[in-house]
Image (tube, rainbow, N blue to C red):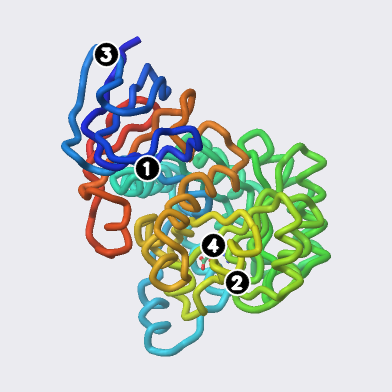
């Protein structure tokens, strides 16, 4: 197995409490797919090869724990109407459902690959994506299969919207029965959009219970467009995360503070849909584990940029830069209940993100500037 010394690191973020502090330069040793050593460059062991990053900052690759990237079609016209004043509505999902059903498998897979590559070029090394634009047994199974071949983590979101031509009760029977059977081999998670205009709290609890009975972990889209039962349902079901979490009551924050459920915040989505910024400061101060994710999808938020999410979390939501970086790396890993990514402790998957900047502060100080200089994923250097 080849060992690689990444050295000359000006600022190193490992999320390892025992890592040496103070001034660099620092170094990381990659052995095969994993991190084998981190510390001061002068103490580094000899390796087969060395890469000098010349004083740049190194951090774990982004863990983007919330995207919807199995889709076809385009919603640019909807976005243009939105910026002209029309509110975002969940019913826009049906437009993408129609386009996705009409697309060929190869087209869906190629689009997914393009978006995953786009994210990787910006430092995302672990990515979750969802079904949810099929909404028939065959189309959801196809989306799950395509997603499983293209990303790290796959979530079944059959309960995204009740499709045209059926009732919510009949559709839930399908989601919790034959549709779940058809996707279960390809997915690790089950999700439900718990919101006015989508599914209510009882429906959401039913979907999560059906998934749990098949061994799937739970996730919930909740409290996106207004207050609602999403957080309470997620916490009661022991879901790994509740995503959006924009409109929270004090009871919601208290419930999250006493639970293992991560609050996954999607600030780029809130910006794109005219919602207030998510209450990141309030959640962190209450002791809630917070993740930041892109929510890349063709409707509510068409960006794969985790750096943008970090910048928004700092500039709009009151997090410090280290808090935002932690939420976009370790927080995402917690939301996916993974120990191998989101940090650079010895044994971690060697997912390294080298910034064209001396410190992570530049992520918020230089919003919109592409700052990714190099990326390693599982020990392999990607071309960025
Ligand atoms: O997370 N909230 C529901 N689902 C997506 C939106 C999907 C769409 O508009 O196509 C979201 O924002």
Q: Earlier in the sequence, mark 1 or mark 3?
A: 3
Which label sits in the foreground, 3 or 4? 3
Q: Quadrant of residue 242?
A: bottom right
Among the two numbered marks 2 and 3 on one chain, the one whose residue lies closer to the N terminus: 3
Q: Is mark 2 within 8 Å of ligand 1?
A: yes
Question: Could you give the CA–CA distance between mark 1 and mark 2, rounded to whole angstroms?
Answer: 28 Å
User: For mark 3, does the 10 Å Cα neighbourhood hold few (<14), some (14 to 19), or many (20 or more) residues?
Assistant: some
Up-down relation of residue 300 to residue 68 (above or below) = below
The answer to whether the residue bearing label 1 lies less than 8 angstroms from the nearest atom of ligand 1 is no
Question: Badge 4 is on which residue?
Answer: 265
Task: Using the image, tell me which numbered label, if any, was put on residue 113.
Answer: 1
Between disc 2 and disc 3, the foreground one is 3
Q: Nearer the viewer, residue 294 or 292?
A: 292
Residue 253 image position (x, y, % from top left): 70, 67
Q: Residue at x 64, y 39 (%)?
A: 188
Marks 3 and 4, the one that precedes in the sequence: 3
**Would you say residue 102 is visible in this rendering?**
no
- Does dot 1 land on a helix, a strand or a loop? helix
Q: Residue at x 47, y 70 (%)?
A: 318
Q: Is residue 304 left or right of residue 90?
A: left
Q: Which mark is residue 47?
A: 3
């Amino acid at each position: 197995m080849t060992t690689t010394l990444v050295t000359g690191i000006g600022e190193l973020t490992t999320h390892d409490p025992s890592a040496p502090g103070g001034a660099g330069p620092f170094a990381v040793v990659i052995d095969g797919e994993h991190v084998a050593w981190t510390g001061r460059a002068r103490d580094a062991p000899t390796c087969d090869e060395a890469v000098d990053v010349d004083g740049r900052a190194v951090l774990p690759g982004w863990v983007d724990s919330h995207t919807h990237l199995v889709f076809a079609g385009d919603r640019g016209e909807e976005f243009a109407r939105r910026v002209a004043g029309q509110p975002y509505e969940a019913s826009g999902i049906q437009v993408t459902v129609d386009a996705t059903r009409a697309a060929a498998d190869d087209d869906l897979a190629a689009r997914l690959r393009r978006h995953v590559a786009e994210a990787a070029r910006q430092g995302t090394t672990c990515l979750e994506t969802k079904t949810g634009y099929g909404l028939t047994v065959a189309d959801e199974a196809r989306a799950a299969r395509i997603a499983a071949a293209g990303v790290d983590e796959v979530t079944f979101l059959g309960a995204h919207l009740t499709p045209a031509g059926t009732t919510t009760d009949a559709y839930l029977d399908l989601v919790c029965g034959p549709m779940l059977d058809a996707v279960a081999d390809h997915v690790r998670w089950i999700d439900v959009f718990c919101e006015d205009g989508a599914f209510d709290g009882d429906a959401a609890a039913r979907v999560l219970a059906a998934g749990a009975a098949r061994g799937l972990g739970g996730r919930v889209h909740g409290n996106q467009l207004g207050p609602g039962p999403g957080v309470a349902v997620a916490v009661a079901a022991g879901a790994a995360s509740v995503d959006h979490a924009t409109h929270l009551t004090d009871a919601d924050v208290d419930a999250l503070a006493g639970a293992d459920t991560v609050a996954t915040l999607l600030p780029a989505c809130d910006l794109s849909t005219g919602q207030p910024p998510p209450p990141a400061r309030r959640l962190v101060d209450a002791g809630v584990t917070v993740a930041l994710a892109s929510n890349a999808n063709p409707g509510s938020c068409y960006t794969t940029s985790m750096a943008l999410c970090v910048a928004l979390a700092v500039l709009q939501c009151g997090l410090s830069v280290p808090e935002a970086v932690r939420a976009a790396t370790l927080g995402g890993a917690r939301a996916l209940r993974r120990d191998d990514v989101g940090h650079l402790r010895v044994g971690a998957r060697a997912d390294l993100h080298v910034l064209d900047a001396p410190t992570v502060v530049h992520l918020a100080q230089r919003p919109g500037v592409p700052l990714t200089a190099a990326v390693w994923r599982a020990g392999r250097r990607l071309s960025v």
